[in-house]
Amino acid sequence: MLEVEMIEEPLYFFAMLYVLLEIAGVYSAVHAILNTRTSQAAIAWAISLSIIPLFILPLYWIFGNSRFHGYMESFRQARLEDIQTAHKAFQQIQQYHVTDIDGLEDVTNTVNNLEHLPFTSSNSAQLLINGQKTYRAMLKAIEQAEDYVLLQFYIIHDDHVGEAFRKLLTDKMQQGVRVYFLYDGLGSLSLSSRYLQELRQAGAHVSSFNERKGISKYLHINFRNHRKILIIDGLKAFVGGLNLGREYLGEDESMGYWRDTHVMLQGPSVQATQGVFVKDWYWSVGEVPELNWLVQRAETVCKSTTQDSEKTLDAAAHCNQHIMLLDTGPADEKPVCSLFICALINQAKSRVWIASPYFVPGAEVINALKNAALRGVDIRLMLPEKSDKYFIYLTSFAYYRELKGYNIKIYRYTKGFSHQKVFLIDDNLAGVGTMNLDNRSIYLNFEIMAYVADPGFNQQVAAMLEYDFKNCFMDSIDGFEQRPFWFKAISRIFYLLSPIL
């Protein structure tokens, strides 16, 4: 009798534990349904939590949070001095606000109604293709710094690329230049403490994005700051797809040739970019650095550099470009990124060309692409044939079935790994930045895109992408059905889980 009781006790314990897990799973499933941003994600979480709560519960409470709480609220509660600085910066940018751009009325209306940073005039954008050209331009700009350097990247490696930047920053600090260095703690997880310590000892202000203490630090672990920003003296800004590492020079044997795109900005778009950095810095550190908020019009820059071929912009004749910096993230009260992408696609009349390393969009983006294709818009998606994230690569094929019959062309880049994030809309708008066409970038990451409304810049981007298309093969949408069974099965499983990837 005693033996029976001893056996029953652990069984009773495990039975009660299972019941408690099921209750917690059901509660969390209801929480997901009520709070998750998209219906697809809510369904994926709810089913997973109900079926296998033991494994999914901890994942949900770490990765299931769809809002980054406290980000905007922290700035609203800032010191009066910091609020006045932010207001002054916004007033400077507003002087160059452009409300009407021919052919982009719907896009500008969307931006205005989203109460976001506007398109501004008197800008200039220089296209930077691949790592060597981008790093050369960045290092040269840092060499010219006289007051401060703001640097923010998702991934920073302490290889020879990272060391080149660290050494130059150290040299500039010895000359009295201030350095503010912000990185994503998860993206730069492999960055050595030695690297950071040497920067601090040289006088740099260094912080990871989610530096704040408390439980919120762990609840926010799923939210990543994916931005790549470099600002020099409030006069030049760089944004785009490149982090700091030798792989971006094509020196990673596993990935080979690395195709990426960056852009250098001058004009009021620099102050707009600077404002994005300041918000991230304030969230991390709780203070606003003393920065230059006076706009230097790009026309002035162009006139002063036409005698120097090294400094002349690739688009020297286009020094009054209209540019908007779109910063998006999980702290947005509205789904800004998703709404704006759909606005771009819905606005398009002749073409939508998108280059993205990852293609796992939501239903709203897929439907916008379908509708545009039915209007006769030339839809081209450039995706890598070689990927650094195999499960996302597999997932992208599951979308072929949805796109079948809509005359949407899918190109697979074969020369190496295409990591660039580029949008080309009709003949007058192009975007370069950090946003991938996947659920994480659209809803969970802090991202930044520079959208340039200028026919000349548009032609440059079109020529760049046309050259890239020559290094692609056009994939058959019917090809998914011809794949092996295991490939289709895994692809569809990841597709079902894509809203929570």
Image (cartoon, helix red, strand yellow):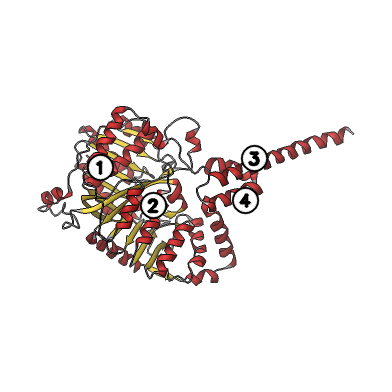
Disc number placed over residue 24 in the picture, else none: 3
| Residue neighbourhood size for the residue with mark 3, other residues' Cα within 10 Å, grouped as few (<14), some (14–19), many (≥20) | some
Closer to viewer: mark 3 or mark 2: 3
Tell me residue 273's x, y (percent): 29, 44
Task: Count numbered badges in the picture.
Answer: 4
Q: What crowding class fits label 4: few (fewer than 14 Cα within 10 Å), some (14-19), or many (20 or more)? A: some
Mark 3 or mark 2, earlier in chain: 3
Q: Position of residue 53 (x, y in %)?
A: 64, 44
| Residue denoted by label 2 | 435
Dot placed on the residue nearer the N-terminal end, 3 or 4 = 3
Q: Amino acid at mark 1?
A: Gln
Indicate the secondary structure of the residue bearing disc 2.
loop
Residue at image coords 52%, 46%: 36
Provide the residue designation for mark 1: 271
| Apparent side of residue 180 relative to residue 212 in the rendered image (left or right) | left
The one nearer the camera, 40 or 409, is 40
Residue located beneath label 4 in the image: 47
Q: Quadrant of residue 483?
A: bottom right
